[in-house]
Image: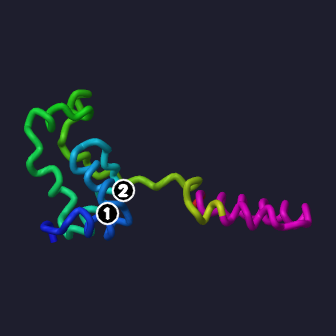
Amino acid sequence: MLGMSQQKLGEALGLTFQQVQKYERGTNRVGASRLWDLSNVLDVPITFFFEDMPHEVAGNSPRLRAGLSEEPVPEVDFEPDPMAKRETLELARAYYRIKDPMVRKRVFDLVKAQAKVDADI
């Protein structure tokens, strides 16, 4: 599908062919999400767009200039932050929908007691 016209590519991406021309000429930068769309429409892996990157450009990466290695980071077994989970947000919303303050306090005490029991096991 790499041989398609700018018009067809624009249509597939929901853009005008003029916008595609601006990307092609380098007038406008291609954002990550648009690059993802392009790889899907053209049916190529996203790495396709970097295959011909000159070595001096690749070596100028901010990550490399900062001295960060390309070595894979060893996998660390850790728990994600529970405050970032959807379940936590849903629980907090449900808790605050309990109108009776005494019931809400008892639910709170129940959860704390259960957490202590689980921690002691």
Membership of 48 in magenta stretch = no
Q: Main secondary structure of the magenta part?
A: helix
**Disc ID at residue 33:** 2
Which residue was labeled with disc 1? 37
In this view, 6 is above or below 64:
below
The spot of residue 33 in percent (x, y) is: 36, 56
Residue range highlighted in magenta: 90-119
- Name the residue rendered at 20%, 70% in the picture: 43
In which quarter of the view is residue 69 placed? top left
Q: Are marks 2 and 1 in contact (CB under 8 Å)?
A: yes
Foreground residue among 68 and 33: 33
Q: Quadrant of the N terminus?
A: bottom left
In this view, 8 is above or below 22:
below
Foreground residue among 38 and 5: 5
Task: Say what amino acid the circle numbered 2 marks.
Answer: Ser
Query: In terms of secondary structure, where does tag 1 sit?
Result: helix
Specify whether 49 is left or right of 95. left
Foreground residue among 40 and 91: 40
Specify whether 79 is left or right of 53. right
